[in-house]
């Protein structure tokens, strides 16, 4: 150990290695991506994110505020995004429910922001200190009205870090809220994290308009590539932002054509780019007869089992989803095409399984390996089901 | 303070909704609603340029133009205070 | 500048009913901004949802029309992230004090430099005349066909108790006083609350037999009196108008600035330790 601390170079390297909780990995990712505003309200198992940022943000001239509730936190980050800052809030189930109305506002008004939901048992207060993955659909349809959303996840701390950076990048690229769906195990477990040098991971900065002062700026007129350059509040362009259907100036409109085009734009900008947004990892997937599809902490058990089965010569592999919404239909269809059976491993009653069934060629070969009892699903839990499907009994 | 002299009442007929507020509260009964329920200055010679009609109009539909330019913005409401008919 | 230079003229005539007091508040607010000579680029108007909230679309400032009740939460994010901006937050009575009541008291408690303007017409105008937390008992509303039994908030007392450092009340009848108070509120450093009694002739006036806009303004004239006036002394049932509180108190963004300075200083001091001392050892030991 002490040998390492000989040269400055080594010192810097060792400083970049941390042993942290997933929540801290998320904080490090956010800082790496350039977060400078966070508003939140304490809730287990996400609280460490707020606590750490209350210390780290002011150190670099950023702002942290503990608001009166999760609704206010969501609203505050939207306000801060409009002044040109990279923003985030973090919560868990009950707080995520409270954020939904303002999340829809961010979709409608196209405000870049990152919302972390460290999932716990639910509905209602459920179990604050135990794991669940029950918010998959809430992330998709929690806010009312037709809309598209991006939701990402990760199964280890290095990936938590990188996917958090990614979340900020996608939020800026598509001018949209991005949800990070972690879970209690990921949030609280400790493992190694290596923080990459600045510049190693790409960072997407805010795209600002080049329209000059005095020239009509249209905040809601997409460029040819579909992106909408922004102008910071306080700058030269004064425009309106609203949650009502609006025209290219951001002014409320009931014109059927304007409304239809706006909704198409909001949905298409994400759905048409699903291929570019899709994030995943393959583990032992080459020639797999049995494909396990999983994400977040449950993917750890799935990967463990696949490794174990491969060692015994069984063709079991894992497709680990890192983007849940927009659902990576094309990817799932392709990776499952030659599978004898597909087992979705998750800690809910089959929320992702339903999506998988909807997009594979033969839904009857899709099975669910789940746990909904507060406990992390184990490799043995999955193996039991796998053996039954294989016709080998338990 | 020099007395302001009326030049004209600039009335935006597209914006006026005929609510009658300016008519009713004009201390000198200068204004009336016409048959289209739009305000008109029927006795401009009586106007004391208090601007209360302009200040109270919810629709920003009436403006009192005076001879003396009031580029000094703060004179606007202060002039009016001095001639106002407000209570207490 | 002329008043018309502060509005987005292409959206006029505005959508409010004839004689709606909200228009007069817009009028007074524009004059206050004009007389203060504020730069339009430095102002952000944030509003919620309601007839009142539509005010933000008409002004030529940066404007943020948000969610019912949440204007102050959005405004807090705007202000804290860019404290050099002036935040004007007009809200309906339901917007500010029913659904938004919690944000209201907390913004006041923080004494964050925002000007909250409560456009109090004592009713939910936009949704068709339901009673609000400022209606008070004995009023008719579309959800109180037998009259209300709910007590109302006293906005002034509530704001003071919650920690606002500038608190005032006026009416749409007393428009000169309004302009004057708004100017003071906007200039005030800290959370300022201006309650302006407004009229909704369409719902409140009609249901409560208070007549049209003109009669409702007459009513405001009759039922209110200036702080310290003889009228108020003689008849304490009158609603007092004027400035109730105007004090210097630590402002939230300025206090946060101090926190940032401290945090930066402490990390600077720790930095050498981090590089050559125990901390680096610890980190890699654990890894
Ligand atoms: C979350 C939510 N609840 C309810 C509504 C419906 N709503 C819109 S405006 C309003 C009340 C408006 O009353 P007030 O705030 O007093 O403003 P006014 O219209 O009288 O100016 C209500 C209940 C809404 N838009 N959002
Ligand atoms: S107050 Fe304004 S809207 Fe009403 S009648 Fe007069 S000019 Fe017309
Ligand atoms: S300026 Fe005063 S006197 Fe003249 S029309 Fe208006 S309200 Fe009447
Ligand atoms: S309903 Fe009432 S509050 Fe709404 S615009 Fe009409 S008069 Fe004003």
Image (tube, coloured by chain):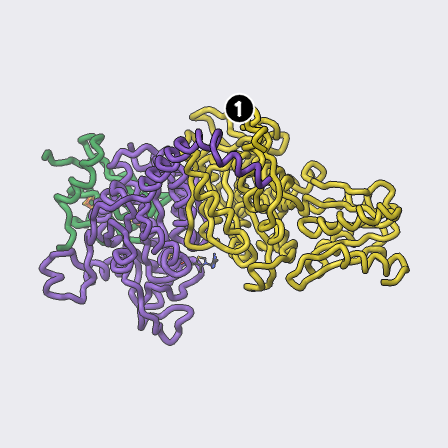
Apparent side of residue C130 relative to residue C25 in the rendered image (left or right)? right
Q: Is residue B18 visible?
A: no
Q: From what the image shows, is residue A160 above or below residue C242?
A: above
- Name the one closer to the observer, B41 or A136: A136
Q: Colour of chain C?
A: purple
Which chain can be seen in green? B
Q: Can residue A274 be seen in this view?
A: yes
Q: Which residue is drawn at 55% across and 63% down?
A: A125
Snapshot quadrant of residue A191 = top right
Residue A172 position, x and y percent, is: 56, 36
Q: From what the image shows, is residue C155 above or below residue A264?
A: below
Residue A75 position, x and y percent, is: 46, 48
- Crowd around label 1: few <14 · some 14–19 · many ≥20 (10 Å): few
Dot 1: chain letter? A
Write down the residue under mark 1.
Answer: A8
Q: Which residue is drawn at 48% across and 39% down?
A: A81
- Name the one closer to the observer, A1 or C141: A1
Apparent side of residue C209 relative to residue A93 in the rendered image (left or right)? left
Callout 1 secondary element? helix
Residue B87 position, x and y percent, is: 15, 55
Q: From what the image shows, is residue C64 above or below residue A214?
A: below
């Amino acid at each position: 150990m002490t040998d390492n601390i000989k040269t400055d170079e080594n010192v810097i390297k060792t400083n970049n290695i941390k042993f942290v909780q997933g929540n801290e990995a998320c904080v490090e990712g956010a800082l790496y991506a350039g977060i400078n505003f966070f508003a939140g309200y304490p809730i287990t198992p996400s609280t460490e994110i707020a606590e750490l940022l209350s210390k780290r943000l002011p150190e670099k001239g950023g702002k942290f505020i503990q608001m009166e509730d999760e609704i206010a936190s969501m609203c505050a980050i939207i306000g801060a995004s409009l002044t040109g800052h990279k923003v985030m809030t973090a919560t868990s189930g009950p707080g995520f429910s409270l954020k939904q109305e303002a999340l829809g506002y961010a979709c409608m008004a196209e405000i870049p922001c990152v919302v972390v939901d460290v999932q716990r048992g639910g509905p209602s207060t459920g179990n604050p200190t135990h794991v669940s993955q029950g918010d998959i659909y809430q992330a998709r349809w929690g806010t009312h009205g037709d809309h598209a959303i991006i939701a990402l996840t990760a199964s280890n701390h290095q990936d938590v870090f990188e996917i958090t950076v990614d979340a900020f990048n996608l939020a800026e690229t598509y001018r949209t809220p991005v949800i990070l769906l972690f879970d209690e195990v990921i949030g609280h477990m400790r493992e190694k994290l290596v923080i990459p040098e600045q510049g190693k991971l790409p960072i997407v900065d805010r795209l600002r308009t080049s329209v000059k002062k005095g020239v009509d700026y249209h905040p809601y007129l997409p460029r040819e590539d579909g992106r909408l350059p922004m102008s910071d509040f306080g700058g030269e362009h004064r425009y309106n932002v609203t949650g009502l259907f609006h025209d290219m100036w951001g002014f409320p409109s009931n014109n059927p054509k304007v409304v239809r085009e706006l909704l198409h734009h909001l949905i298409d900008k994400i759905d048409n780019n699903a291929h570019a947004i899709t994030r995943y990892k393959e583990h032992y997937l080459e020639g797999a007869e049995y494909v396990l599809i999983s994400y977040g902490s449950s993917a750890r058990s799935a990967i463990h089992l696949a490794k174990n089965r491969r060692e015994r010569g069984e063709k079991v592999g894992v497709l680990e989803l890192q983007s849940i919404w927009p659902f990576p239909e094309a990817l799932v269809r392709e990776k499952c095409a030659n599978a004898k059976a597909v087992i979705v491993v998750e800690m809910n009653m089959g929320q992702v399984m339903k999506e998988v069934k909807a997009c594979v060629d033969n839904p009857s070969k899709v099975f669910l390996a789940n746990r909904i009892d507060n406990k992390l699903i184990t490799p043995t839990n999955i193996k039991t089901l796998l053996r039954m499907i294989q016709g080998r009994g338990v | 303070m020099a007395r302001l002299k009326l030049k004209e009442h600039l009335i935006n007929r597209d914006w006026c909704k005929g609510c009658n507020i300016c008519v009713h509260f004009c201390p000198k009964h200068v204004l009336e609603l016409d048959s289209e329920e739009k305000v008109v200055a029927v006795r401009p010679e009586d106007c004391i340029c208090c601007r209360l009609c302009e200040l109270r109009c919810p629709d920003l539909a009436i403006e009192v133009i005076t001879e003396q330019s009031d580029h000094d913005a703060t004179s606007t409401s202060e002039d009016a205070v001095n001639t106002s008919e407000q209570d207490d | 500048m002329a008043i018309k230079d502060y509005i987005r003229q292409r959206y006029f005539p505005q959508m409010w009913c004839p004689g709606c007091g909200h228009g007069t508040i817009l009028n007074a607010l524009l004059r206050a901004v004009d007389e203060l000579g504020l730069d339009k680029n430095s102002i952000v108007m944030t509003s919620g949802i309601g007839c009142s909230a539509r005010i933000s679309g008409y002004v030529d400032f940066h404007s943020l029309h948000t969610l019912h009740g949440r204007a102050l939460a959005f405004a807090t994010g705007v202000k804290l992230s860019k404290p050099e901006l002036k935040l004007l937050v007009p809200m309906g009575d339901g917007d500010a004090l029913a659904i938004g009541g919690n944000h209201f008291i907390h913004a006041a408690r923080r004494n964050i430099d925002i000007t909250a303007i409560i456009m109090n017409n004592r009713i939910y105008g936009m949704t068709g005349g339901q009673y609000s937390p400022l209606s008070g008992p004995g009023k008719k509303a579309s959800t109180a066909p037998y009259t209300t039994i709910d007590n109302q908030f006293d906005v002034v007392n509530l704001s003071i108790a919650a920690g606002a450092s500038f608190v005032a009340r006026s009416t749409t009848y007393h428009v000169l006083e309004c302009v004057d108070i708004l100017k003071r509120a906007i200039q005030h450093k800290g959370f300022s609350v201006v309650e302006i009694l407004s009229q909704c002739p369409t719902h409140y006036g009609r249901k409560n037999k208070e007549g049209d806009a003109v009669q409702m303004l007459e009513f405001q004239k009759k039922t209110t009196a200036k702080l310290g006036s003889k009228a108020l002394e003689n008849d304490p049932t009158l609603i007092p108008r004027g400035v109730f509180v105007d004090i210097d108190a630590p402002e939230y963004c300025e206090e946060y600035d101090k926190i940032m300075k401290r945090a930066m200083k402490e990390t600077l001091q720790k930095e050498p330790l981090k590089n050559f001392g125990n901390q680096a050892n610890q980190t890699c030991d654990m890894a």
